[in-house]
Image (cartoon, rainbow, N blue to C red):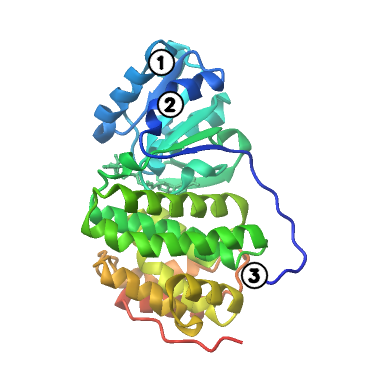
Amino acid sequence: MHPINDFIYEALPARVLFGAGRLREVRQEVERLGGRRALVLSTPHQAELAQTVVELLGEVCVGLHDQAVMHVPSETVEAAMQQVTTLQADMLVALGGGSTIGLAKGIALETGLPILAIPTTYAGSEMTPIWGLTKAGRKTTGQNPVVKPRTVIYDPQLVMTLPSAMSVTSGINAMAHAVEGLYAENANPITSIMAEESIRALAQGLPLVRQNPGDLETRSQTLYGAWLAATVLSTVGMALHHKLCHVLGGSFNMPHAEVHTVILPQATAYNAGHAPAAMRAIGRALGADPTDAAGAIFDLSRSMAAPTSLRDLNFAKAQLSEAAAIASQNPYFNPRPITREGILELLERAYAGLRPEPVAIS
Ligand code: NAD
């Protein structure tokens, strides 16, 4: 259990619909938000499913923009903005993963248009007020309540098409929000309950999803875990793990969910001795000894044949030191103090894919 000390708990508003077939309620949800001219957004890859959403929306939809891409380049926001203006859209319906929801957020940042999000991965952007934009190769992020989706429809049927390897890494990406939420500077009993339950649901469900990506029950369980993780991400601050993933993704163009998967056990191990309550919660959720919480995350990934080393992701070893230097800049909260040497050692272990050693927990 999380120690009950002083805390501030500030929940962000959200209306969440969860369940198989809930997509069919999209029109009434758009109307509930006052939308009369919704623009649907998707990647080119998901255009067919997005067209189904256009049809479900009928006359409250003015069109489909299916040009979302990874990292939300500013040109893609500008192109979508033209369509928003031409079609006089009054609402955005984002169907897809973090990239599509990110495009909707980029538009909302400029226009204030409300977003209804229909996530199809486990990444978690749908619950947060965090936006990210890439301009001239540099990704900037920020927080603004205007970009937070007003309504989220979680329909596990939509995640069933996510290939099994992507499901695993996307699920560990979600788990990372929960793990860091447990030792966040502003951790509190409510988010810690959600975080522990999230880790449990994801750890139990992901191996089954991997075996059978089309099983609705385990898709529901894992999407539920992802929703809890996203809620934690939206409520408390993240630490070293997210910083490292941001550096490796933003400055070295490494793939988002895979990097989260490789770094999570190593970042957890780095913090283990300084976050005993978090390690106990992770241990309970994974059925592992708290001294070996990081190792248990590593074992979970390895058992699902997920990447466990930066070498596997073709990261250049010569860049480890530069990555460590960037990640140790701009002091930020982390349970264990950040040192460049410490981060370099962590990254070297991540590069080699070493299983974390057990750590004494007070
Ligand atoms: P993604 O949105 O980039 O999707 C990856 C690919 O999978 C795309 O081609 C997409 O079309 C396809 N895809 C998505 N769902 C599918 C499905 N159900 N079936 C088949 N294919 C499907 O990947 P992601 O991991 O969801 O998002 C990563 C991005 O989201 C990163 O840029 C990250 O920074 C951002 N993100 C932002 C936040 C936030 O709070 N702002 C939170 C998490 C992630």
Mark 1 surroundings: few (<14), some (14-19) or many (≥20) residues within 10 A: many
Q: In which quarter of the image is the N terminus?
A: bottom right
Residue marked by disc 2: 25
Identify the residue position indicated by label 1 in the image. Answer: 61
The one of 110 and 120 positioned closer to us in this rendering: 120
Element assignment for label 1: strand
For marks 3 and 1, the one nearer the N-term is 3
Residue 317 % position (x, y): 31, 72
At a point 50% along the width and 58% down the height, the residue shown is: 177
From the viewer's side, name the closer residue of 95 and 349.
95
Q: Position of residue 260 (x, y in %)?
A: 39, 61
Q: In which quarter of the image is residue 137?
A: top left
- Give the side of residue 235 with respect to residue 360, left or right: right
What's the CA distance linking mark 2 and mark 3? Answer: 37 Å
Q: Which amino acid does label 2 sit on?
A: Glu
Residue at (24%, 35%) from the top-left corner? 45
Tag 1: residue type?
A: Cys
Sequence-wise, which precedes: disc 2 or disc 3? 3
Camera-nearest label, 2 or 3: 2
Q: Residue at x 29, y 23 (%)?
A: 51
Q: Mark 3 points at which residue?
A: 2
- The quadrant of the picture showing ligand 1 is top left
Q: In the rendered view of the protein, which quadrant contains the C terminus?
A: bottom right
Q: Distance between the residues labelled 3 and 1?
A: 46 Å
